[in-house]
Amino acid sequence: MIPVQESSACEDLTISTTASPGKGVTCVDGKPSYNELGISLEKPKKLDMAIRGARLRTFARFPADHPLTADDLSEAGFYYAGNEDCTRCFFCGGGLKNWDQTDNPTVEHARWFPKCGYIRQFKGQDFVDAVQALSTRYDKITYKMVTDFMGMLAPAFQLNDRKDCDPAIKALIEMGYDARSVLQAAEELITENDSALSSDIILDRIQHHCCNKRQISQVGLPDNYKSNTEESIQDVKKNNKEMRQLATCKICLDNRIAAVFLPCSHFVSCLDCAMALRQCPVCRTTIKGTVRAFMS
């Protein structure tokens, strides 16, 4: 690890991604810690950057020819500090610069700042632990190396987070569509473009796999599938919309609900919005901690 000596937009907590990470300290007292239980009691150092949109706006002056995108950096919790390619985490305050085109912002965040409450909530403690284990053996760590180390392929890992809570996937499976075919279509869509899924888009992808209508049942559609699917698709869209509304953050109305507030236990916010709140928007109780959770 090479601290930046000169005074700049990124100061003592800024390190170069070409340096070497330090080792974290783990305290064991015979009982599970809050970290092990997935409970975060910390608050972000820069509250005004807790929302991803605010972090994205800081990259307006980011070097245009930089190999990493503002989307990836902001999703990993970083905002632009205004000097060269220096970025800083809104939560822990840790800064990174001298990014390489092979760097993955999420992996590097977990590698250099494993105690950061945001990265632990965002990716989970298992992900952080896997990155730390790999950092003792490798200088360069890819996202695939981490997910392989965790015993699964990267697309499956990403899909695992979504298949248990994505309304589009759940709606199709509950309506009788073959789960394997639905998940395969969803995985392809996520791999091609990691955006919001919808039931009609997944259905289109399943149909695309058909050579002709006679083969529809062979790719996982229900046996009673109609040649005219308009009515069926409309029903799926309606169910999908209702389920998505239930699973959507009540603050930003965009991301999925993913955080439980403590001690009140209300479950109404995505991780991004949860980081920016001091009080529960439902009962106004002071938020003393958050837990990442999934709808099933």
Image: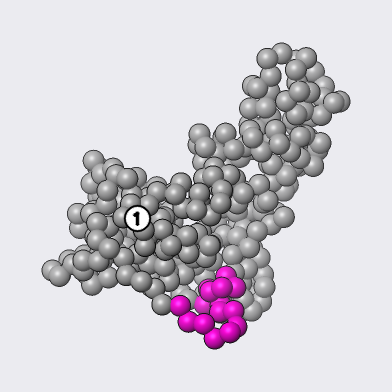
Can I make out residue 209 in this image? yes
Name the residue: 67% across, 51% down: 165
Viewer-nearest residue: 245 or 35: 35
Q: How many numbered dots are placed on residues in this image? A: 1
Q: Is residue 177 left or right of residue 89?
A: right
Dot 1 crowding, Cα within 10 Å, few <14, some 14–19, many 20+: few
Q: Position of residue 273 (x, y in %)?
A: 52, 62
- Residue placed farthest to the front in the image? 137
Q: Is residue 68 left or right of residue 110?
A: left
- Residue placed farthest to the bottom in the image? 29
Q: Position of residue 265 (x, y in %)?
A: 67, 73
Image vertical order of residue 229 relative to residue 16, above or below = above
Image vertical order of residue 145 relative to residue 97, above or below = above
Kind of element beneath mark 1: loop
- Residue placed farthest to the left in the image? 6
Which quadrant of the figure contains the C terminus?
bottom right
Q: Is residue 168 magenta?
A: no
Viewer-nearest residue: 60 or 144: 144
Name the residue: 43% across, 71% down: 115
Q: Quadrant of residue 87?
A: bottom left
**Amino acid type for the residue under numbered disc 1:** Tyr
Q: Position of residue 92 (x, y in %)?
A: 38, 70
Viewer-nearest residue: 9 or 37: 37
Q: Quadrant of residue 2?
A: bottom left
Q: Of helix, strand and loop, which mostly describes the magenta segment? A: loop
Image vertical order of residue 290 relative to residue 180, above or below = below
Q: Is residue 275 left or right of residue 222?
A: left
The magenta segment is: 26-41
Q: Is residue 29 magenta?
A: yes
Please name the residue that numbered disc 1 is placed on. 138
Which quadrant of the figure contains the N terminus?
bottom left
Q: Position of residue 242 (x, y in %)?
A: 73, 47
